[in-house]
Amino acid sequence: MGTKGEQDFEAVVEFNTGSIKPPLWIARAGSACDKVGNMGKSFDIGLERLTGMGVGEDGQPQEGGVKPPLQDASGDLKIGPYLNAIETKSAQPGMAVPPGSTFYLETFGCQMNDHDSEKVAGVLLARGYRQVNGPEAAKVILYNTCSIREKAAQKVFSRLGELRPADEQHGKSFNTEDTEEEHRVHRDGRALEKNHPSQRKIVNAAGGKIIGVLGCVAQQEGEEIFERAPWVSLVCGSASYRKLPQLIAELEAGNRRVTGLDTDTDETFETEITRRDNPWRAYLTIIEGCDKACSYCVVPFTRGPERSRASASILEEIRQLAEAGYSEVQLLGQTVNSYADPSARKMRFSELLAAVAEVRGIRRVRFTTSHPRDFGKDIVEAIEAHPTICDHVHLPVQSGSTAVLRAMARTYSREEYLEKIALLKAARRPISITTDMIVGFPGETEKDFEETLSLLDEVQYDSVFAFKYSPRPNTPSLKMPDAIAEEEKGRRLAILMDRQREIQRVMNERLVGETFEVLVDGKSRRENQWSGHTSSNRVMNFTSPEQELLGDYVQVKVVSAMPNSLVGEMVGRTR
Ligand code: 5AD
Ligand code: SF4
């Protein structure tokens, strides 16, 4: 199949994900609600590097990496087909829904944010709110934001600019006929983009609505958001989400402005009810925050210190998820393998993985993101011993040069990283390895960059998420000399992506003729065409004459391969 055919097929699969309605709701122990909602959404973000962007609409490489085709188009914004499906989702049966109590929640950034939003939505739905798929109809508008790179952080101010009420316009109306200048929010001389046409209609609409900024930008900018956008009434960072119900209650009681900005916490955010978006794969945060202090990264500032959830509570939730029909769980954490059980059981991460793998009904266990420093042989042994733990490890390296790794404060050298890779390659079954790379870090020489390219050749990654270095507030790398010009970063990114695309093409071609188990999560409008993921998290588009396969595990034989996906035909089912 040619490139065009590949794109056609993948695009159709992406936006037509079927109408199966498995249970989507699960209540924690003690909650009155169980399986109270259904939703026809299936939208997979592939290798879920929420922050990658890949190839742009013009076909040119953009910030971000070679990404699986089912990732959303921007890579940074998680709105999509599934939001239509939740438009009319109402609160728990039997709960009075106060008239007009609707919310719109838009999520930017990583899987952790996606999952935080599932919990935030759960909190609101449990209070009696109804979720709508656009800000126009919403009483409460929430943006769950990302600040990992500047572009992502800017997006929220663009959104807020479009919600600016009339009396904040300095006598000007704010409509789509205005010049581009007037659409922009300016700060520190930076012009912010305008986008998302659906929002342009809601000019002057802030009156009477509660507008909230959540997540990393909230934590980073704090109360300054009120100064830039006085129509905002809630600013809450992720380390304070446990306070959200109380903050929302204060807003409902008429408080004009509320904030949750502490990062000084040892608590995790757990809710009575989580509204999960994916009907088969359940995300579960096991460790929040990050203590690693990589010199380029805002996460330790925005998400606070590492705090792990007790193993018994994790396992109990997974048992309930399995009972509710989820067959795949993905354990989440910025550094998931730094998990430190706070309970007396003191389970190691590899022990927790093994325990999760043994929960009856769970067929696939994934985890992301692992930090190389805490990645040991015990994790590989857990994978080997438990076929339910997927054949995939995401192990961000960031650079192939030891000098750059040192400047990044990554705590390992190229050689030490390669020792971890050797552990994975020596495993008794093949394990797919993916990574994150940053190009154009301050001081990165041409020779350093060459080392990054040679690392690609040496490791043979199944997928790479590559980013141009983006200077972030408060981070040590902000003050480092020898910044690399944007143009040069772009050049290096394009070279890296070309090299990696070729590696993936060759590796995927070797898989032709092999048969893989696939969890079916997409249905094409075209007859007999489906898509799903292998245990190694490869996207598989395949043909089958079956009427209904969504959520099933099937055997698919690969007939051809593309750099980002495989094409196959179904040869049987696994029960
Ligand atoms: N600039 C570019 N990329 C970054 N990442 C984190 N911080 C930055 C930054 N300042 C990338 C890293 C990380 C991924 C989630 O985002 O590769 O692994
Ligand atoms: Fe950021 Fe490094 Fe922590 Fe990852 S490990 S979140 S890159 S500080």
Image (cartoon, grey):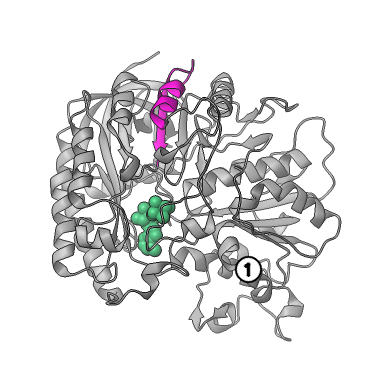
Q: Amino acid at mark 1?
A: Leu
Q: Position of residue 367 (x, y in %)?
A: 41, 36
Q: Does residue 538 appear in the picture of this structure?
A: no
Residue placed at 23% from the left, 46% from the top? 417
Q: Position of residue 379 (x, y in %)?
A: 33, 30
Q: Is residue 131 magenta?
A: no
Does 190 sit above or below residue 473?
A: below
Circle 1 SS class: helix
Number of disc labels: 1
Q: Is residue 352 magenta?
A: yes
105 vs 541, left or right, is right
User: Label 1: few (<14), some or many (≥20) within 10 Å?
Assistant: many
13 vs 60, left or right, is right
Q: Position of residue 163 (x, y in %)?
A: 67, 68
Does 547 sit above or below residue 9?
A: above
Which residue bears the numbered disc 1?
Answer: 160
Residue with the most extreme bottom position: 171
**Which portion, as a residue range, is magenta?**
349-368
